[in-house]
Image (cartoon, rainbow, N blue to C red):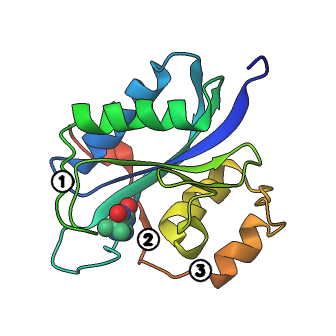
Amino acid sequence: MQQPMVSYIALGSNLSNPVRQLKKALLAMDQINKTYLLAYSSFYQSAPMGPKDQPAYINAVAKIHTRLTPLELLDKLQAIENQQGRERKEHWGARTIDLDIVLYDHTIMQTERLTLPHYGAKQRDFVLTPLAEISPELVFPDGESISQALTNCAHYNLEKVELDKIKD
Ligand code: ROI
């Protein structure tokens, strides 16, 4: 693959110092072979989607350039999740780090391992708000703009995290 592709990755964590988990994952993503971190959003605290008896989440979105294919990228992101102690237990339960490919260029695909664009992204403000922050003109492969998607999505009490007030 000669030209790098633009891809957006959603980050989420609600265990073991979520802010630190996100920072660690951003550094690890920048170390992936054939991949460069171009930008990342502010960090947002959000109420849990799914079971409510779990801690609040910290969410962000990163923009990368990559020469990996979508499935190669997925392998690398899952390796980072595993390094950071992600355990796949309860469906929609608490997690140390979740790295989801939201978009990969204009690719639309539906396979057992990977659906692009990410199936839930357009319904979640904790993905759309950080995405809009770094890419306000973004248009989804189906032609819907990020601002249209934001008016239609579900809300999870997003609050921007002031990182310089957090000690880690
Ligand atoms: N809820 C929020 N607010 N943020 C997430 O990143 C998140 N991730 C998940 C589920 C369990 C669906 N809930 C979430 O995987």
Mark 2 residue type: Leu
The residue lying at 52 percent from left, 72 percent from top is 124
Mark 1 residue type: Leu
Marker disc for residue 15 = 1
Q: Which residue is mark 3?
A: 153
Mark 3 residue type: Cys
- In the shown orientation, is residue 89 left or right of residue 65? left
Q: Nearer the viewer, residue 55 or 161?
A: 55
Marker disc for residue 158 = 2
Compute the Cα span from label 1 to label 2: 18 Å
Q: Position of residue 96 (x, y in %)?
A: 22, 49
Label 2: few (<14), some (14–19) or many (≥20) C-alpha neighbours in 10 Å:
some
Q: Position of residue 25 (x, y in %)?
A: 36, 34
Label 1: few (<14), some (14–19) or many (≥20) C-alpha neighbours in 10 Å:
some
Relative to 126, say whether 61 is above or below: above
> Ligand 1 closer than 8 Å to the CB at disc 2?
no
Q: Secondary structure beneath disc 2?
A: loop
Tell me which label, 1 or 3, sits earlier in the chain. 1
